[in-house]
Image (tube, helix red, strand yellow):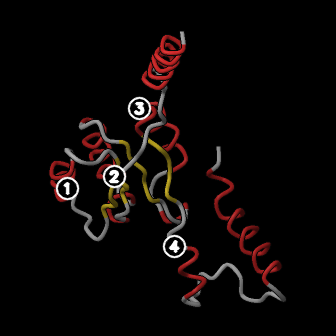
Amino acid sequence: MLIALVFASLFVTVELISNRQYPEFFVGVEFAYSGNVSDLKDLVDKMKNYTNLLVIGALEISFNQTALDEACDYIYGTGFHFIVLFTNSQMYSYNIFVWMEEAKQKYGTMFLGVYRYDEPGGNQLDHDSSMLVKNATNYADAAANYTGNFRSLIKYYLN
């Protein structure tokens, strides 16, 4: 009886584990420092067997809607998920908010979203002109100011 109970428990455990749904896990790279869509396509082709995500971090591509559309179409066609870096919305010759809405429709779940603000922590540590906190009385004050200022930078992208 004990042996039958052990085998039955083992069988149920194996069945539960084998039917479990695991969340998707992303491993990828960022494409930056080249505004050439052909270079982006070459990178996608080189890494398609061992990764599933590409971050388009080249501003030369995101500033040019035609280049961005070409890049995203190619990435989508290879089955990759992707994220696009956008900076200040007034720097673009097209409406990036409209583009994002259309991208959600066109690419579905392959378009994971927007990479909005590059290295906010690094800017803070480097005392860059883009520091989010210039003065704080203590660590709690610095944390509150940092998160509040950062939240205001990204809040219009949340929807």
Amino acid, disc 1? Leu
Please give the name of the residue rendered at 82% of the width and 86% of the height, measured from the top-left corner.
Answer: 138
Amino acid, disc 3? Lys
Please give the name of the residue rendered at 50% of the width and 16% of the height, measured from the top-left corner.
Answer: 12
Disc 3/disc 4 C-alpha distance (Å): 29 Å
Disc 4/disc 1 C-alpha distance (Å): 23 Å
Question: Mark 2, residues whose alpha carbon is within 10 Å: few (<14), some, or many (≥20)?
Answer: many
Disc 3/disc 1 C-alpha distance (Å): 23 Å
Disc 3/disc 2 C-alpha distance (Å): 17 Å
Disc 1/disc 2 C-alpha distance (Å): 9 Å
**Element at badge 1?**
helix
Residue identifier under label 1: 43
Asked if residue 3 lies left or right of residue 159, the reply is left
Question: Mark 3, residues whose alpha carbon is within 10 Å: few (<14), some, or many (≥20)?
Answer: some
Placement of 119 over or under 114, stated as above or below: below
Horizontal and vertical percent for residue 83? 42, 50
Residue identifier under label 3: 106
Residue identifier under label 2: 54
Residue identifier under label 4: 119
Closer to the N terminus: mark 3 or mark 4? Answer: 3
Amino acid, disc 2? Leu
Placement of 73 over or under 16, stated as above or below: below
Horizontal and vertical percent for residue 126? 54, 89
Rendering quarter of residue 130: bottom right
Which callout, 3 or 4, points to the residue nearer the camera?
4
